[in-house]
Image: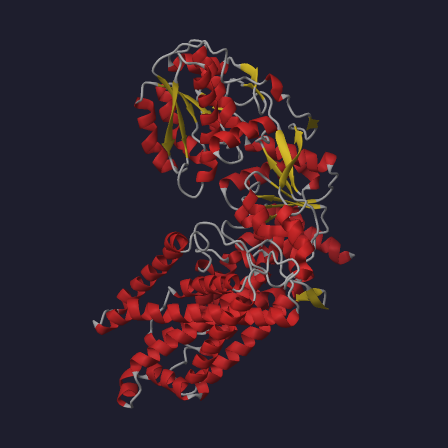
């Protein structure tokens, strides 16, 4: 028995070497071994997440804002200032670094444009790595606060770290403008120095729910969510806004890290619904949508900004086709994308535009003669102007006065 | 018609009691009963194969080898690397190579996975457990070592493997899937769709289980395993090399884990991730205990039972209760039969 096992193992090793030697890649061979799949290969590699429409909180379509009147960080080129800097805090290393780097590169582009145009006002951009971790962020925050040249902070990037450090920045009276933290609770803490540069999870959930019932015409939607704060909160808003269109019988809750959704798939399959809404991140969304499709469920799949990531398309392949994904973040206009590409060496990502806009507002403040932290906060509170992504004007809690959600589709 | 009304009445009562936390949806369970059974059996077959590894090692060493879940995880990476080596680049869609070639490729990938897992299991035994045994360490030390080894293997794949392989394998995200088989329905059975993947998993698992059962019960090596399990000292006196038997036990457990890993990735191609063995390993361990740890056939029965109960439970109570169901079943069975359904018996004469 032992000998035969060894023989089989050796045979297998030999066989695999032969096979490896015999044929190279089966993916791009086209006319080779994978000839039959040539068509679908082309389809899969062409799939990407494309912007579809911008909607407001009632699900109505809003024309994309006109970026031509957007504030320009270069200003008129005559600004005078000395020894001032801006800070950026977020994940620059670790698993979520991609998001932090999107934000940093957007901010850097604005500062570079400003410094190039204004020889007498050189602003330094200081970056602080929090790894997206609330605990690390609380250690970093005092360093930012104690640097007296820092007039404004872009960040923190994530909701958890913002929640953990908000008190420190409030105490120091330092402007904290986030380009990405979307937890609704953040603006209920009385932090007068906190401004959010995009819609929160409530507005995203309400907008897509209205869009599903009013525009897409779904009468019965299965709301599935994982067990993380973000997802539960979002699913809650979506379910409430859907009202009678949310089908309680096929609502399901899955767990972070799950890869096998068989029971949930069966529940959805037998429900005769019009669509499936998933609140969560791409890591679970990708296997979920794959398993839905392979068990024959062809219902439209709608998800959120946690799923709105190229990794979702990479993992799910053709199963992700036609999925609707929302984001409070807007797509980058083409001339911004060109500038960003030249500066950062890659295409703009999620939140790059928001970061650029927020830093531009800070730079405008500096150019207008703001020299201390209190005036910077005042400048933001009174600001009313167009940016590249959207119109910026905040209410007293630090939320944007009017928020929009972008609907994207995998095509 | 009246059944629907009744269901609605019952449903509203339950809703009043439990709101959203727990569902008690018997309609959902019974209308999908056969579909859930089919799915449950195919997951159960995978639990069963992994459970064999726990049960054999426990039978021989009285050691719960918690690192076995990571042996399974390494098997997933092993078969993934073999597929990659054969030219299947990862992509979102399934390849279509025709039945004969697909079966051959899966066979080779499975052998690759089995070799990686088997090798890792034997290596683990050498590095982590043998030195302890030589020094006569108490069993608690073995247990802690097993848990430690589990973390070491996970973090190796998490942090070190990507550096060694130019970020092709391992790391934080799941591997981009390589799908060889598009899951399609072969036939329908009381309204349940039986897919090609389900069939392959259940058949392959049964064949492997039967082979192991014959190996342990009807070969010279199997007799050695049973002898050491029964009484290590006497077995040594009778000329059985204990060390070789222990190595063999780890090898067999590892090989089966590698096979299970390949079958699992057929079902869920996105599951290849450094943390992907953990929960499944715990479930398989529960399956081994459920059937009677140390008992080969018990592991198989326990695995199938756990897979099916888990899916019934999810349909009835809601998917978020999945793991709770698995472990409540375990507790209930152990209350009635403390040694598991079939009892602990690897060491008995009739295994």
- Residue A346 in view in this figure: yes
Locate residue A30, reporting x and y percent: 65, 57
The quarter holding residue B43 reads bottom right
Taking the image as shown, residue A79 lies to the left or right of residue B43, namely: left
Total residue callouts: 0
Q: Which residue is farthest bottom?
A: B238
Residue placed at 44% from the left, 49% from the top? B172
Residue placed at 54% from the left, 73% from the top? B205
The quarter holding residue A118 reads top left
**Residue in front for this viewpoint, B327 or B18:** B327
**Residue in front for this viewpoint, B183 or A240:** B183
The quarter holding residue A135 reads top left
**Quadrant in the picture for the N terminus of chain B:** bottom right
Q: Which residue is farthest left?
A: B135
Q: Which residue is farthest right?
A: B1
The vertical placement of B160 against A198, above or below, is below
Taking the image as shown, residue A263 lies to the left or right of residue B300, namely: right
Residue placed at 53% from the left, 19% from the top? A394
Locate residue B155, reporting x and y percent: 37, 54
Locate residue B283, reporting x and y percent: 47, 63
- Residue A333 in view in this figure: no
Give the colour scheme of this rendering.
Answer: secondary structure
**Quadrant in the picture for the C terminus of chain B:** bottom left
**Residue in front for this viewpoint, B110 or B14:** B110
The vertical placement of B269 against B257, above or below, is above
Locate residue A67, reporting x and y percent: 61, 21
Residue placed at 53% from the left, 33% from the top? A348
């Amino acid at each position: 028995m032992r000998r035969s096992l060894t023989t089989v193992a050796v045979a297998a090793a030999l066989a695999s070497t032969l096979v490896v030697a015999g044929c190279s890649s089966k993916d791009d061979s086209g006319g080779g071994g994978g000839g039959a799949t040539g068509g679908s290969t082309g389809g899969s590699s062409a799939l990407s997440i494309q912007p579809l429409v911008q909607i407001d909180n009632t699900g109505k379509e809003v024309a994309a804002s006109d970026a031509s009147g957007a504030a320009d960080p270069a200003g008129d080129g005559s600004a005078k200032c000395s020894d001032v800097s801006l800070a950026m805090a977020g994940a620059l290393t670790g698993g979520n670094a991609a998001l932090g780097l999107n934000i940093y590169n957007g901010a850097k582009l604005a500062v570079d444009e400003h410094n190039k145009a204004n020889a007498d006002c050189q602003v330094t951009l200081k970056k602080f790595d929090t790894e997206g971790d609330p605990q690390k962020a609380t250690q970093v925050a005092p360093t930012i606060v104690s640097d007296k040249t820092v007039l404004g902070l872009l960040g923190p990037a994530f909701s958890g770290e913002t929640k953990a450090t908000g008190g420190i920045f409030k105490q120091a009276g330092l402007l904290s403008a986030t380009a990405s933290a979307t937890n609704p609770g953040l603006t209920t803490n009385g932090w007068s120095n906190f401004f959010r540069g995009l819609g929160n999870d409530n507005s995203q959930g309400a907008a897509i729910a209205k869009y599903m019932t009013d525009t897409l015409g779904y009468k019965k939607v299965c709301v599935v969510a994982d067990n993380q704060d973000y997802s539960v909160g979002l699913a809650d808003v979506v379910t409430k806004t859907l009202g009678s269109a949310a089908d309680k019988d096929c609502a399901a809750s899955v767990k972070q890290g799950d890869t096998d959704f068989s029971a949930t798939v069966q529940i959805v399959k037998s429900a005769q619904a019009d669509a499936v809404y998933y609140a969560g991140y791409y890591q679970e969304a990708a296997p979920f949508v794959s398993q839905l499709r392979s068990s024959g469920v062809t219902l439209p799949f709608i998800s959120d900004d946690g799923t709105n990531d190229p990794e979702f398309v990479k993992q799910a392949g053709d199963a992700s086709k036609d999925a609707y994904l929302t984001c409070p973040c807007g797509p980058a206009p083409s001339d911004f994308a060109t500038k960003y590409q030249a500066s950062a060496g890659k295409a703009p990502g999620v939140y790059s535009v928001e970061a650029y806009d927020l830093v531009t507002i800070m730079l405008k403040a500096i150019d207008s003669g703001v020299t201390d932290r209190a005036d910077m906060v005042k400048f933001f509170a009174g600001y009313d102007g167009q940016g590249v992504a959207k119109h910026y004007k905040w209410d007293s809690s630090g939320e944007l006065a009017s928020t929009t959600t972008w609907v994207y589709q995998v095509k | 018609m009246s059944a629907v009304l009744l269901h609605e009445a019952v449903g509203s009562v339950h809703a009043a009691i439990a709101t959203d936390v727990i569902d008690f949806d018997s309609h959902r369970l019974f209308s999908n009963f056969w579909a859930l059974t089919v799915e449950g059996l195919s997951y159960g077959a995978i639990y069963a194969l992994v459970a064999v590894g726990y049960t054999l090692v426990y039978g021989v060493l009285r050691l719960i080898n918690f690192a076995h879940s990571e042996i399974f995880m390494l098997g997933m990476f092993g078969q993934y690397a073999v597929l990659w080596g054969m030219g299947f680049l990862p992509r979102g869609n399934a390849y279509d190579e025709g039945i004969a070639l697909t079966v051959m490729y899966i066979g080779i990938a499975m052998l690759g996975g089995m070799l990686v897992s088997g090798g890792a299991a034997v290596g683990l035994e050498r590095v982590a457990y043998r030195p302890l045994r030589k020094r006569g360490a108490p069993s608690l030390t073995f247990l802690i070592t097993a848990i430690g080894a589990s973390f070491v293997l996970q973090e190796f794949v998490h942090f070190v493997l990507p550096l060694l392989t130019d970020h092709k394998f391992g790391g934080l995200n799941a591997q981009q899937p390589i799908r060889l088989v598009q899951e399609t329905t072969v036939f329908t059975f009381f309204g349940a769709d039986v897919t090609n993947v389900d069939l392959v998993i259940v058949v392959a698992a049964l064949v492997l289980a039967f082979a192991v059962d014959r190996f342990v019960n009807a070969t010279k090596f199997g007799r050695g395993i049973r002898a050491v399990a029964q009484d290590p000292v006497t077995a040594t006196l009778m000329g059985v090399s204990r060390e070789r038997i222990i190595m063999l036990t780890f090898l067999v457990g590892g090989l089966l884990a590698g096979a299970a890993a390949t079958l699992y990735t057929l079902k869920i191609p996105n599951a290849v991730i450094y943390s992907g063995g953990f929960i499944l390993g715990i479930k398989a361990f529960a399956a081994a205990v459920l059937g009677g740890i140390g008992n080969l056939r018990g592991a198989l029965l326990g695995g199938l039972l756990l897979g099916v109960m888990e899916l019934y439970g999810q349909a009835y109570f809601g998917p978020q209760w999945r793991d709770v169901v698995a472990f409540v079943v375990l507790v209930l069975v152990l209350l009635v039969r403390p040694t598991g359904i079939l009892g602990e018996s690897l060491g008995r004469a009739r295994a």
